[in-house]
Amino acid sequence: MAFRIGKRHIELAKVWLPSAAVFGATGTFAFLYFSEWKLINQYIPFYNTKYKIEE
């Protein structure tokens, strides 16, 4: 049984692409928030105040 990608599959992918992008972005930001990954989080506006550099 061979699986072929047809026009209908491409149309469905186009419809679901915005939702998949939003879920992916939300998951990425949730990971960054809960992981406390300083390397990336120091560049997020309003969130980087946790990482003040003492002079």
Image (cartoon, helix red, strand yellow):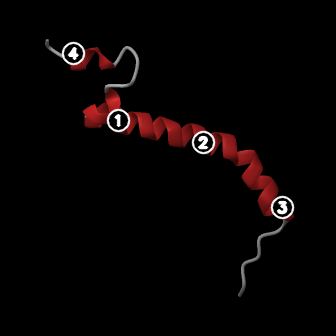
> Which comes sooner in the sequence, label 3 or label 1?
3
In terms of depth relative to the viewer, which is nearer, 54 or 30? Answer: 54
The tag on residue 8 is: 3
Please state the horizontal and vertical placement of residue 51, each as a whole percent of the image.
23, 20
Label 2 to label 4: alpha-carbon separation: 32 Å
Q: Which mark is nearer the camera, 3 or 1?
A: 1
> Which comes sooner in the sequence, label 4 or label 3?
3
Q: Amino acid at mark 1?
A: Leu
Is disc 2 placed on a helix, strand or loop? helix
Residue at the disc numbered 2:
21
In the picture as drawn, the residue positioned furthest to the left comes out as 55
Query: Pointer 1: residues within 10 angstroms few (<14), some, or many (20+)?
Result: some
- Left or right, 6 with reference to 52: right
Is disc 4 placed on a helix, strand or loop? loop
- Left or right, 52 with reference to 22: left
Label 3 to label 1: alpha-carbon separation: 36 Å
The tag on residue 32 is: 1
Residue at the disc numbered 4:
52
